[in-house]
Amino acid sequence: MSLFLARKKILKDIKTLVIKDGWNDQLFFNYAKISKFSNEEINALFPEGYKTLIDMYLEEINLKMTKNSKKINLIRLRTHERVRELVKLRLNIMLKEKILVKKTFIHLLLPFNHKIAYKNLYRTVDQIWFLAGDNSTDFNLIGPSLIWVTALLSVLLSAKNLIQDDFRDGSLDLLLISPIPLELVLALKAFAHWISISLPIILICPVISVLFTIPSDNLLILIIGLFLGTPALSFIAILGASLTFSLRRSSILMPILIMPFYIPTLVFGVKIVSFTENTNEYHINGLLILLAITLLSMSVLPFAAAMGVKSCLK
């Protein structure tokens, strides 16, 4: 059996153990007990450990998305419609193995897995845009991608404290009985969160652009896109915080709940910088989409978050 086939077979067989026990250091040892492969053979096939299997599994989802995308007539669709259909396709593929996907995402949210999480997030976004028709091969996309993912991870890491601290010290009860509408309080919290987390990242973009040799024209589009798109990240975070603030493991559950809502902002935020054809039209359209997402988030999510807070306190 070839190396590729052996790895593929182990990935297929080991999914049952992952669904039961999650990704852990004993995974290969437990699999060796029920398979024809010895523990030494498995370690030789995967010298970097089970994280190679995580890479293979997430790449398998990308390959299924690529294969199934051929069944969709993407040519007749506009760019944003192609992205939407591809995201829906990927979510449907993940839904078929939702327990395994949940275990994988929970493991990737652990702090020491940030490198593999970022690598696969970038790979997924890049594959979606490649299938949507973007075939660029330069490295100008790396800088904007890092900045957007940095903004996203910064929001996720700090979001759990948006409401949880008020809940623990009793301030939340006072906010509920105050004359100020709870919706307004949550909107102001989200805005303050954006100022303290996302705005500093936007301000250091010129420095980062030097490191990644981002052209000045692209830098301007990137900064405008961040100004228009990052507020939506904080308003989505306030919704997630409102649904999980009373739970013990809110820091793990909340990213799982709200991550799908971040995908459109992340995808359009990264790719508006890399368009080379019909540049002005695509830049304007992409910025308008980011603005629309932010305005929708600002107008709807504070009310949804207020309902979430009230329902959790009942």
Image (tube, rainbow, N blue to C red):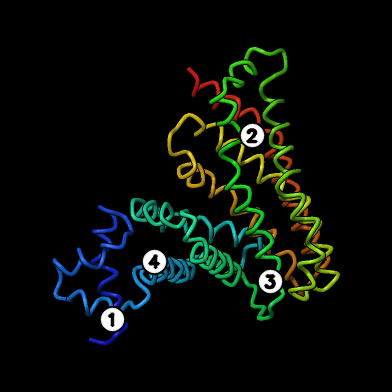
Tags 2 and 1 touching, CB below 8 Å: no
Front tag of 3 and 1: 1
Q: Quadrant of residue 59?
A: bottom left
Q: Secondary structure at mark 4?
A: helix
* Distance in Å between CA atoms under marks 3 and 1: 35 Å
Q: Residues within 10 Å of mark 2 (few under 14, many from 20)?
A: many
Q: Which residue is mark 1?
A: 44
Percent from the top left, x then y, of residue 165?
A: 58, 30
Mark 4 / mark 3, whichever is N-terminal: 4
Say which mark, if any, is on residue 54: 4
The type of residue carrying mark 2 is Leu
Point out the image quarter for the N terminus.
bottom left
Q: Residues within 10 Å of mark 3 (few under 14, many from 20)?
A: many
Mark 1 / mark 4, whichever is N-terminal: 1
Tags 3 and 2 touching, CB below 8 Å: no
Q: Which residue is mark 3?
A: 141
Percent from the top left, x then y, of residue 22?
A: 31, 55
The type of residue carrying mark 3 is Leu
Q: Nearer the viewer, residue 111 or 307?
A: 111
Furthest-front residue in view? 169
